[in-house]
Amino acid sequence: MIFFNDIKPTGWLKNKMEWYMNGHIGELDKLVPHLITEHKIYGRDRLTPRTVSAEDGVIKKQNNPDDNMMQYYWWDSETQSNWKDGYCRSAYLLDNKEWQEKASDLCLELIDTQDDDGYIGIYDSSLKFNCKAENGEFWAQATALRFVLGCYESTRNESLLTSLTQVAQCIMAGYPKETSHPFVVEQGFAGHSHGLTITDVFYRLYEITNNIEYLSYCLWLYEDYSAGCVSEQDLQYKNVIDPGYLLKGHGVHTYEHIRALAIAASQRPQYQTALDIFLSQLKYYLTPSGAPIGDEWITGRTANATYTGYEYCSVHELFSTYVMLIKLTTNIGLADDAEWLFYNASFGMQHPILHAIMYCKTDNCYEANERKHPDSNQFNTRYKYSPTHEEAAVCCVPNTARTIPAFVENMFQENNNGFTALFYGPCEFYGTFNNVAIKITQLTEYPHDLSVKCLIEPESSVRFALSFRYPGWAKMMIINGVTFTKNDTQNSLIILDRTWQHHDVIDIKFIADIQFNTDLCGDTYISRGPVLYAIELESDILIKKTLLNGKYFDSGYIPYSRADESIQFSYADMESFSYSTSPEGKQYIEGFFYLNKTKIVRKLIPFGQTILRKVTFSNIES
């Protein structure tokens, strides 16, 4: 199997990760020490029947919750563990000894909190596996154990795997199959429902150990969730198969819960049918960038590039779901969706030059000054740039640390006959086939340069199948001078089965046209290859707050003018559009648009490089 850390980022991907680690991601524990380093929620500060919430300073009883305020008790576990997970995985992928030492210390600090019975978690002995209110048990364990899994896979330290299997056995004893109901509590809310992601941990442990007990526990967890009384119901079986049901839940929950259904679907045909139904409807909730509605609840809406926002956590969770689905269903076509989401929505929420992200954003982003839209009279702190977003929650920033490692981890997949290049981008893959060590390097500036050079370096001659994903947007692929079209693919793959020698080279060129796509509102958006393009709107920056002695800051952006919001497009002018690269190496598309019925020329740049932008265009003939 391919372990995390068997694939390394290179080129611009590595540079981007190093930039994060030298900035707000690497220093998040300094930016919010009270949430990450000072609050020992897994150790000395475990929750008891009488605990002071770090968020509101009010003493409440665990068995007497006050509406949904009980969620604040477990919040810091999510912030800490997701940040540590991203930090650890980045440190090992980048081979930085200083960062690796810190990651190791963070991991050992968590392991030192493990009880004799194997328990790792946030509750004391009177509440563990027995919290009757807003139960954050599974969620705190899922985030922490994903972190430990990253450390184990990076180092292959068997003592970490022992700790993981011990806590897994402890969980299964604490919530035994068939005789307990972890998804039935009094007034459960976000943490309780987040807990279904513990299936991430059990499924990965199943892959590593081949212990079928872990897989069957995942199935039971999904079935208990489906039968339970939970706040987040979108992925309950009865709702998934209901043709009249519209998604309504908290977006992050909905998109992460798909993974539990997918794992269940791998074991029961009825759940595969349900999964197929769900995936057939997912497109109605996606904006042109691929981002899913999540601002923060879906509330039965369909996606709109201007008026439905999305949360970075939703983007990350949907990406993680895509890679799980590819693994479980072998639907390689989903890799197009995952790559599109990564290169567009993910980077489109991050500031192109500063250490900050937007917690929530829209595809057509006309203002980024704590409002979703310039015409809105609702204040929302999520719609600005920040290195922490502490006013809302420190959840999205830690997840930005996890997304590139998740992408890199899945750039290659292993199969019985060899390997598949699933995602394209600069990386090095280290694997073995028939006991022969193999290194495969992707040399590329992809996604902006649609060419990839693959260096194949086996230690000795070895035959295996090396497969390359044929993207749905590609007109053709030219591999070492030979042209391939979609008709030449098997399950969206071009398969090269041969005996490979040291220093074999595969040159790939993707041929792609400028594409004019139609969104759910009937508007047009423009792309080339895996990149969405947008008109960048000029803006003024407003510094709202400085952090860490002025090194970082929260900022808002307001447009110079709102005129460009009204720009329109005509299909009659499609031939006017051309793709070019500037002398500085910047890619852009240029063509005719209309403003107040006057024909104008506008440039579009990659969506992921924008702050304020216009992505979709109504048709002037409509």
Image (cartoon, helix red, strand yellow):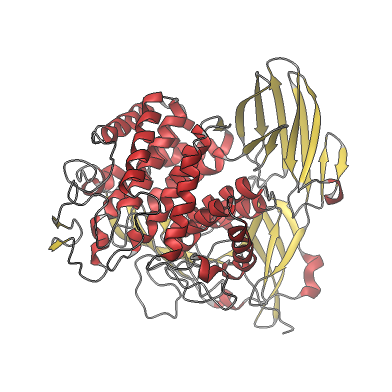
Q: Quadrant of residue 160?
A: top left
Q: Nearer the viewer, residue 59 or 543?
A: 59
Q: Is 21 placed left or right of 610 in the picture?
A: left
Tell me residue 356's x, y (percent).
40, 52
Q: Quadrant of residue 521?
A: bottom right
Q: Quadrant of residue 131?
A: bottom left
Q: Nearer the viewer, residue 70 or 130?
A: 130
Tell me residue 520's x, y (percent).
64, 74
Residue lying furthest front: 179
Q: Nearer the viewer, residue 149 or 441?
A: 149
Q: Is 489 placed left or right of 224 in the picture?
A: right
Q: Nearer the viewer, residue 460 or 579?
A: 460
Tell me residue 60's x, y (percent).
14, 63
Q: Residue at x 22, y 46 (%)?
A: 41
Q: Residue at x 38, y 55 (%)?
A: 195
Q: Give above or below for 333 relative to 113.
A: below
Tell me residue 205's x, y (percent).
46, 38
Q: Is 524 placed left or right of 512 in the picture?
A: left
Q: Split into 4 quadrants, where in the image is the N terminus?
A: top right
Q: Give above or below for 516 relative to 622.
A: above
